[in-house]
Amino acid sequence: MSVIRIPSPRSVIDRRELVQTIEKLVEAYGAAKGRRYIVETLRSALAEGREEIARRLDAKPSAGHEVAEAQAFLTDQLIRVIHDHVVTNVYPAGNRSKGERLTIMAVGGYGRGEMAPHSDVDIAFLTPIKQTPWCEQVIEAMLYFMWDLSLKIGHSSRSLDDMVRMSKSDLTIRTAMLEGRYVWGDQDLYEEARARFFKDVVSGTERQFVVEKLAEREERHKRMGDSRYVVEPNVKEGKGSLRDLHTLYWIGKYIHKVRSPAELVDVGLLTAKEYRSFRRAENFFWAVRCHLHTITRRAEDRLTFDLQREVAARMNFSDRPGKSAVERFMQMFFLQAKVVGSLTGVFLAQLDEQFAKRQPRGLLAGFRARERVLKGYKVFGGRLRAPSDDWFAADPVRMIEIFVLAEREGLEIHPETLRLISRDAALIKDDVRNDKRANDLFMELLTSRRNPEVALRSFNEAGVFGRFVTEFGRVNAQMQFDMYHHYTVDEHTIRAIGLVSRIEKGELKDDHPLAHEVIHKVRSRRALYVSVLLHDIAKGRKGDHSILGAEIALKLCPRFGLDEEETELVSWLVRHHLLLSATAMKRDLSDGKTIADFVEVVQSVDRLRQLTVLTIVDIRAVGPGTWNSWKRQLIATLYGAAEERLRLGHAEFGRPKRVEAKKAAVEATGPEYAALIEKVGSKFGDAYWIAEPEDVIARNLVQFDASEDEPLSISTEYYPARGATLVTVIASDHPGLFYRIAGGIHLAGGNIIDARIHTTRSGRAVDNFLVQDPLGRPFMEYAQLRRLELTIENALANRIKILPQLVAKPDARPRADAFEVRPRVLFDNKASNRFTVVEINARDRPALLNRLAHALFESKLMVHSAHIATYGERAADTFYVTDLLGEKITAVPRIKAIERRLLEAASEPSLEEVEA
């Protein structure tokens, strides 16, 4: 494909007019003195061309190919003008020798004739033999002109022999040369180079090239997150992106010498319909990439949160009920990535088939493996194949059956058969959806004891899943526009099902000991798997997805063959799938009322077990790093307390008995603790003994005893049981102590994930904080722990201005700016018998907790415990508070005043505030 054709080319750049202008400048000033004016002329031609291309992108925001080709066309014309000027006016050579021949090739992406506005210009200068001085001068002069235009040039200059030798030894060079396209110069030399490349480099290395390219692709996918559903995808390099489409083209070109993607149809690697899908996906990705380059004015290929909203607006996506414009745009993005995934599968399998058809030589030439038949399907070479073209049309239930057979027998589905499935998937209508055999087969696939995750992913990618369960089709490729969820809803769900299967097989015993212990005790494993499938099924609809999902479960479960009891259980699990995590992360688990309220909703041990497994896989399937030992500990604590309450009924220990039991547990941890409890234990109130775990109490007693004569004692240590650092501050209690400690911890680079605040009978505060770094890791090094202690000490001594420093501190996740989280304050006087529970939702940032704590201090409230949960960019901070007399806050005017103050604190601080 040597010539790029675009609509109205002269409005992008008029080469004839540009050449005439340069000729006039040379006549007026000469080539050397006129150089400055020539560069300015070329620069304005480039700028005007880019403006015209940007206008075209604005007018047709989805015309990816057209814009990418226009960019390459503009570059071609400039290179031609520069070349002609150099060989005519700068280094004219009247009678060139055979060696003084030069061809200019576009290579890499530019060679394909497609460029984004700020793509590199990759060119190869080729000469027949070692470069002559004249060739060197021409190449150098051309490069200087291009650099003066601020083009990012990737260039090489080689003889034909060099080109062959280097292409053989380096896969990257070979791929770049494979894309080689004639731009200008000696055309015969270009044809000679192309012929030598295919004869001397390509011939006989086809299979090796395919293997190396696929290995390179796998490596790239791993680097990019190994899923085509990561929520900040790379449009050029990510899984299911442009590079994957290009890989298919490279392979086709290497083996069959195709000159354009359209020829992949002629050589049998794609059908005409698949080629149209290839072009649609490529066109969409090119449009997105061109918008990214235009917005950022640089070669930006990552579709980050802050850019997603802008690209969606530029591509004319709009809001719909339950789905924002950016979510609709990203759903389209992931649907296209999914198309690329299925095209890749079909293409590679087809390629495999073509290689296999080439007759084996030698001893095995006459030997062919025998084909067998399985339930009417042909099985050969580990693949299942439909026996005829109308196989699925005759009985569409077979489109589900084939995936079950493949999973059961450990087989793959033949590419031709996958093509038939994709063609006939539209035949799955209500009669198939309500067919008992179809639903039994689907349940076998979902609850498979082999590998349901892999089976369901291919079932989804073939387009059958969304047709058979249309509610699942609605969340296909749907992203959630936040920093918490790493995957689209369908990918998150399939990963969660895979985790249930792995826990059930005992593969994750160390990561999830509680789930491992309870999963075999649940009464219905079918209900568990279906609840995982349906827990997010109503995402993206208008309304609460838990309530809407529970209604969908009541409709779908009987269809899947679940009985009345299982249906009711699944609906309950979907309705309450966030209950356990919200209680564990945001409530005080030492408060008896928290456990009583939770148990009142759960009502049975079986529901508790089912909900626990569902909660664990839901959190872990959100993405890497969302599951940690702190969450494991909180969930295990809540599970233990709830199970005990459910088994023993509501006969709760009296407070004195619970305190005695805790003291006995502390004594059991070591011989020295009995004397310590005798000496200082009476200074701690009942609430302290009930709230803290025995290992923390043991540490607190030692520190309290050692620091009785000191005004301030700060202890920091790595606390492996919670995957965090335990920070204990003992000081004379005074209002404002909590917010100052919180500010000091944040200034030292720590995030508080939990806090308990106690005042002893002698008027001293004993405050325990669990702290991690911004990436969820504990502080363990001596220098880190020492910095924590010093910063807290300075904050308490008022040696540092906390708020200005916190606000000036850069956010560890600057892209959170892309999200708007409207602050909300909720008061709950029923969640605890002794305290008012205040929950604040706001955008997470370094100064937030300090500002909220300061607002509570200014409102004359005492904080007794604080629980800090973050979900990506959103923080949910919960405080258990009383007034200064230890009473709940009940007066409406007072609640309104506190709410106003907290909302103000949760908003971004103004410059005046900071400077004050």
Image (cartoon, helix red, strand yellow):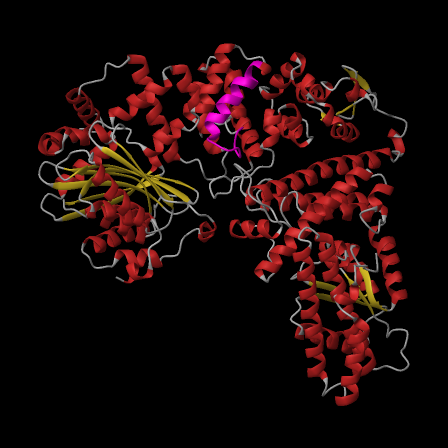
Judge whether residue 554 is colored magenta.
Answer: yes
Q: Is residue 682 left or right of residue 192?
A: left
> Magenta residues?
537-558
Q: Is residue 772 above or below residue 375?
A: below
Which sits in the foreground, 91 or 313?
A: 313
Question: Residue 288, percent across and down?
Answer: 64, 51
Q: Is residue 479 above or below residue 736?
A: above
Q: Is residue 461 above or below residue 258?
A: above
Q: Residue at x 67, y 16 (%)?
A: 438
Q: Is residue 860 left or right of residue 475?
A: left
Judge whether residue 877 is colored magenta.
Answer: no
Question: Residue 646, percent across and down?
Answer: 32, 15
Question: Residue 789, percent across and down?
Answer: 25, 50
Q: Residue at x 37, y 31 (%)?
A: 582
Q: Is residue 612 left or right of residue 365?
A: left
Q: Which quadrant would residue 593 be assigned to in this image? A: top left
Which sits in the foreground, 847 or 905?
A: 905
Q: Which quadrant would residue 518 be assigned to in this image? A: top left
Q: Is residue 892 left or right of residue 98?
A: left
Q: Which quadrant would residue 49 be assigned to in this image? A: bottom right
Question: Residue 687, percent across and down?
Answer: 18, 30
Residue 212 is at least partly visible in this image = no
Query: Furthest-front residue in view?
Result: 893
Tag count: 0
Q: Residue at x 75, y 89 (%)?
A: 29
Quadrant of the rendering where the C terminus is positioned: bottom left
Residue 676 is at least partly visible in this image = yes
Quadrant of the rendering where the N terminus is positioned: bottom right
Which sits in the foreground, 164 or 606?
A: 606
Identify the main secondary structure in magenta: helix
